[in-house]
Amino acid sequence: MKHFLPGLVLIITTNTHALYWQNNYGVDLEVGTDDNYFLTSTNETDTNFSRLSLFIGADGSTETSNISFLARVNGHNYSDKSIDDSLTSEVFLAMSNRGERLDSGLDISYTNESTFESQLLDTGVRVDGRTKTWRVAPDLSYRLTERNTLSMGLSFQDVSYNTTSLIDYQDNAVLLSWSYGLNETSDISANVAYSRYEPDTVNAISTDTASIFLGYEIRPTEATTYNFRFGYSDVDGPAGTQSSRVYSVDINHQRDEFNSFTLNASQIYEPDSLGSVRLVNRLGLGWAHAFTEKLQGLLSADYIEDDFRDYYEVKPGLRYFITEHLSLAGDYRFRREERTAGNAESNALFVTLSYNN
């Protein structure tokens, strides 16, 4: 087996297939300040922070297969001594193979991050600790005809904490789907999913979720995709049986060479670290605008709502490409959370220098 150096492209011939292998690496240095880091209504914590992030990635492909790998390590430092400095990491591996009729894939990921960051977008419960998440997701799809495809996907997820107030859990799921190509630009689909959530507690009772979706995807141009899924979920757990309409909407639109837009909206049942499965509404908007070849404007907005809270986040920013590989970014982030314990707001500024080869 050959080793490779950063920035080097290898072409390896195996039998009749050529493996094109390319890797990249990079570093981010970020500094900033936040006037309410823990996003609490009382005892606001004002801190300066810095983050050093190193990553390496690799992509290999043949005519029929692909493999991608990414590893990242982040070091975080805070001026407020009540916030522990931390080292986080993440690893992703994706493999796929395309056959004459049968396609297969496998995604594996591992993340080790601060409990604050993971819980802010999960439950809103902030405690000092670590979150470790393993996820393995194999899938198969078989083309019955040129237009008809059957697919099956599995997902195995294990989430653990070193904080006793949060509950470790496993969430395993299976998805069966059928898709039919109406024409070259649109498809319809039907999906059936089943998942089992198992909290790691004494006398734990699992929660079973069964869902059915109907979907429609249309690609009016090469730069625009609309994907709609609407369905119904039935949840059976410790609190009894509950049901609800569920949906997801994904829109990606490249308006022109200067502007691109994304919209993601969903209402689905999600597992959490409090020992339950809950119905969560999410809405995300994104916009990117190229002012010049080197200057880009970015804007993102996110909303999360469940039985416990409403969470809002808005983040505008500018990115300037100094060279092909070096860029400088400035961002502002506003966060707001509304819950019965009180409302809280946070304002943060970021300056990030990035090198990507």
Image: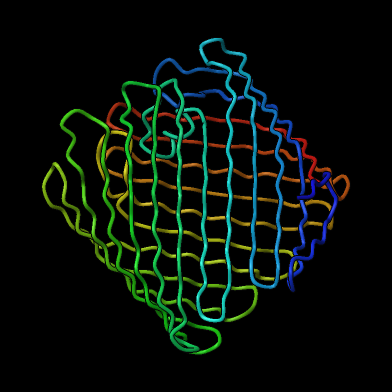
x and y percent of residue 325 in the render?
A: 84, 47
Q: Which residue appears farthest toward the top when viewing the image?
A: 81
Q: Which residue appears farthest toward the left when viewing the image?
A: 240
**In percent of the image, x 88 and y 47: which residue is there?**
323
Q: Is residue 225 left or right of residue 353?
A: left
**In percent of the image, x 47 and y 87: which residue is there?**
147
* Vertical relation: 357 (above or below) 293: above
x and y percent of residue 67 in the render?
A: 64, 58
* Vertical relation: 114 (above or below) 287: above
Residue 22: name its quadrant.
bottom right
Using the image as rendered, state which of residue 9 and residue 199 is in the foreground. Answer: 9
* Vertical relation: 144 (above or below) 341: below
Q: Is residue 34 left or right of residue 153?
A: right
Q: Is residue 310 left or right of residue 108?
A: left
**In percent of the image, x 28 and y 50: which residue is there?**
279
Q: Is residue 25 left or right of residue 86?
A: right
x and y percent of residue 78 in the render?
A: 61, 18
x and y percent of residue 41 in the render?
A: 39, 23
